[in-house]
Image (cartoon, rainbow, N blue to C red):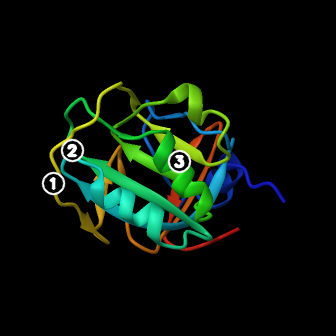
Amino acid sequence: MTIFTADICDEHSEIAQVLAAGYKNYGGAENCQGEITTIKLDKNNSDLIKLLRDEDGTGKVVVVDVDQEYFAVVGENLMKFALKNNYAGIVINGYIRDTFQIKDIPVALYALDTCPRKYIPVTSGERELTLSFGGVEFTQGAYLYADTDGVIVTPEKIA
C-alpha cells in the first residue's frame, strides 16, 4: 500500500511536521518511510559509514545533520551500504555526490544539493540526538514519511 505525505498531512495536521522546501530526492526510490535514526556529523562521514555499513537498517530512515560547509557526506559507496543493510532512506541537512551512480540505487536520498568533494580528515559524529533543521525536530525513534511532495515527521508510526 502506498502512503502519500499529502494524505498524512490532511488526516494528521496536528502532529505532522513538514520539512522546509529545498530538499531534493537524489536516490533511486521515489518514496520511503521508517523509524528515524539520527546522526550529527562534523563534516567527515566516517561515523555515517560505520552506521550504514555495519547496522541493520530494516524499517529505518537515517537523518543526518552536517556542519554547513560545502562538502558531500553521501555518495555511491554509502548508498550501496544503505541498500545492503535495508535502509529505506537517508535525509541529509547537507550535500551529496555521485548523483549519476546513485540515481539507480533503490534507496531514497533527500539532500540540499550536490558537491563533488568530501572532507578527508576524520572527525567524530554523535548519534541518537534530537536534530533540528528545515523547521522540523527529528527525534530518535520518531517516524518519517517522504515522497515526491516532501518529507514529514510524526511522533510515531501512523500508517
Image coordinates for residue 149, horizontal then vertical, percent = 63, 37
**Label at residue 79:** 3
Residue named by callout 2: 43
Question: Which residue corresponds to the image point at 15% horizontal and 54% vertical from the top-left?
Answer: 123
Question: Which residue corresponds to the image point at 67% horizontal and 36% vertical from the top-left?
Answer: 104
Q: Is residue 10 left or right of residue 119?
A: right
Question: Which residue corresponds to the image point at 52% horizontal and 56% vertical from the top-left?
Answer: 81
Image coordinates for residue 50, horizontal then vertical, percent = 37, 64
Q: Quick one: quadrant of the N terminus?
A: bottom right
Label 3 or label 2, whichever comes before in sequence order: 2
User: Gap in Å between the C-alphas at discs 1 and 2?
Assistant: 7 Å
Residue named by callout 1: 123
The residue tagged with tag 1: helix, strand or loop?
loop
Image coordinates for residue 102, horizontal then vertical, percent = 58, 36
Vertical side of 46 occupied by 121: above or below: above
Q: Is residue 82 left or right of residue 112?
A: right
The answer to whether the residues at label 1 and label 2 have Cβ atoms under 8 Å apart is yes
Q: Look at label 2 and name its amino acid.
A: Lys
Q: Residues within 10 Å of mark 2 (few under 14, many from 20)?
A: many
